[in-house]
Image: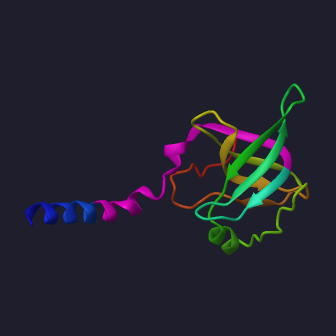
Amino acid sequence: MRSLLAIALTGALFVAALPVLGHHAFSAEFDANQPITLEGTVTRIEWINPHAWLHIDVEDEDGNVESWMIEAGSPNTLVRRGMTRDSIPRGTEVVVFGYRHRNGSNAANGRDVTLPDGSKLFLSSPRTGAPDGDQP
C-alpha cells in the first residue's frame, strides 16, 4: 500500500510540473547579442500556437537562397495588434528584424517586419525577455 501511495504522489508531482515545461523564455533559444536583419520573400505563414511562424527565402552573398523561420508571437497576440492571416501574403518582399537562434540555424525570433509600403508590423511575444530597444 505504501509503494502504491508513493507512486501516486510521484505521478501527481510529475503531472503538476508539466505546465512549467510548456513554454520557454526568449534567452533559452535566441541570443540578444546576435541581432539580425533579413531581406527576403515570404513563402509561408503558420498561424499555430504557441507561436506563429513566418517563413522567408533570403538570398545570401553568393546568390544562394536560404530558407529562414521567424518566430512571432501567438496568433492571438498578433490578431490583437491588428494582424490577420492575410496581412503578409505569400510572395511579399519583407525586411525582418530579430534575433538569431542560439544554435546557429536559419531561425530567428522576429521583433518586427517591414512591408514594401514601409509599414511595420510588430511580431514579438510580450514578456519573454526579448530586447525591446531600437534596432541597430
User: 32 or 42: nearer the eye?
Assistant: 42
Percent from the top left, x then y, of residue 10? 22, 60
* Residue 28 as seen in the image, left or right of residue 61: left
User: 41 or 125: nearer the eye?
Assistant: 41
The residue depicted at 87 percent of the width and 25 percent of the height is: 62
Percent from the top left, x then y, of residue 68? 75, 43
Q: Is residue 31 above or below residue 52?
A: above
* Residue 1 as seen in the image, left or right of residue 89: left
User: 67 or 71: nearer the eye?
Assistant: 67
Q: Residue furthest front?
A: 1
Percent from the top left, x then y, of residue 15? 33, 64
Q: Quadrant of the C terminus?
A: top right
Q: Residue furthest top?
A: 62
Q: Quadrant of the N terminus?
A: bottom left
The quadrant in which residue 16 appears is bottom left
Colouring convention used in this rendered image of the protein: rainbow
* Residue 118 as seen in the image, left or right of residue 23: right
The residue depicted at 63 percent of the width and 69 percent of the height is: 77
The quadrant in which residue 83 appears is bottom right
Q: Is residue 5 above or below residue 67?
A: below
The residue depicted at 15 percent of the width and 64 percent of the height is: 4
Q: Is residue 75 above or below residue 33?
A: below
Q: Which residues are magenta?
A: 14-41
The residue depicted at 52 percent of the width and 55 percent of the height is: 128
Percent from the top left, x then y, of residue 42? 84, 52
